[in-house]
Image (tube, rainbow, N blue to C red):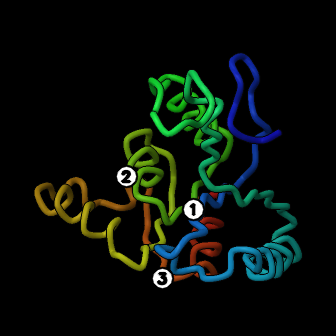
Amino acid sequence: GHFPGKRGIKPKTVDIHFLLRSDMESMIKNLKLAATIIDPILRAHKEKTGQNVTYIIKDWLWDRTKYYDEPDTHEKPPFDYSARLEAAVSMMSASKVLVSDRLHASVMAFISFKPHVMIEQSTGKIGHTRAVAFNVSEDCRDTEALRYVRANDLEESVYKAIEFLE
């Protein structure tokens, strides 16, 4: 499978990873319809440029049986942080560009210098968190140098992700 990576197994690489929420914090209300927005844009891009852009839509996959030492119980067993971090790094490394509406995916992309497109959540959590850090440093607001942009919706995010690939 694509994600998360198992030790020693490299996940399949795609051009764009849409790491998107499917809960009430998402601005994308029907994630199942995301491909109906993405596919026509990528088809038109291929017709225009000849470039076939591959993508995957996957959220964090935290199967607790892979990250806890014991199966789910009412008492939480010790958490395996290294396995979860390894899975996250595997996911992040399997694409050229990340599109996400998740705060921690955005942070990981930023600190790993991964080109990424941020879509804000309904709570404004990503923008507010970034404002705390970025308002302190002019360098952090240099979106071109730091390889990130903000999109207002999924459609705009596809166009911006394509720009990173060019």
| Label 2: which secondary element | helix
Q: CA distance from mark 2 to mark 3?
A: 19 Å
Q: CA distance from mark 1 to mark 3?
A: 12 Å
Q: Which residue is mark 3?
A: 152
Direction from residue 132 to residue 75 in the image, left or right: right
Q: What type is the residue that disc 2 sits on? A: Leu
| Label 3: which secondary element | loop
Direction from residue 128 to residue 86 in the image, left or right: right
Give neighbour class at mark 1: few <14, some 14-19, many 20+ (Cα, 10 Å): many
Q: Nearer the viewer, mark 2 or mark 1?
A: 1
Q: Position of residue 145 (x, y in %)?
A: 37, 53
**Residue drawn at (63%, 75%) of the image:** 159
Of the numbered discs in the image, which one, if any, rests on residue 146?
2
For marks 2 and 1 on the same chain, the one whose residue lies earlier in the sequence? 1
Q: Residue lying farthest top?
A: 8
Q: Position of residue 4 (x, y in %)?
A: 68, 37
Direction from residue 49 to residue 18 in the image, left or right: left
Of the numbered discs in the image, which one, if any, rests on residue 12?
none
**Quarter-of-image position of residue 23:** bottom right
Q: Position of residue 35 (x, y in %)?
A: 79, 74
**Residue 81 seen in this snapshot:** no
Choose between 47 and 114: the one closer to the eye.
114
**Residue drawn at (53%, 32%) of the image:** 84
Above or below, comparing residue 149 to residue 56 in the picture: below
**Quarter-of-image position of residue 98:** bottom right
Q: Which residue is mark 1?
A: 99
Above or below, comparing residue 129 to residue 35 in the picture: above
Q: What type is the residue that disc 3 sits on? A: Asn
**Residue drawn at (79%, 38%) of the image:** 12
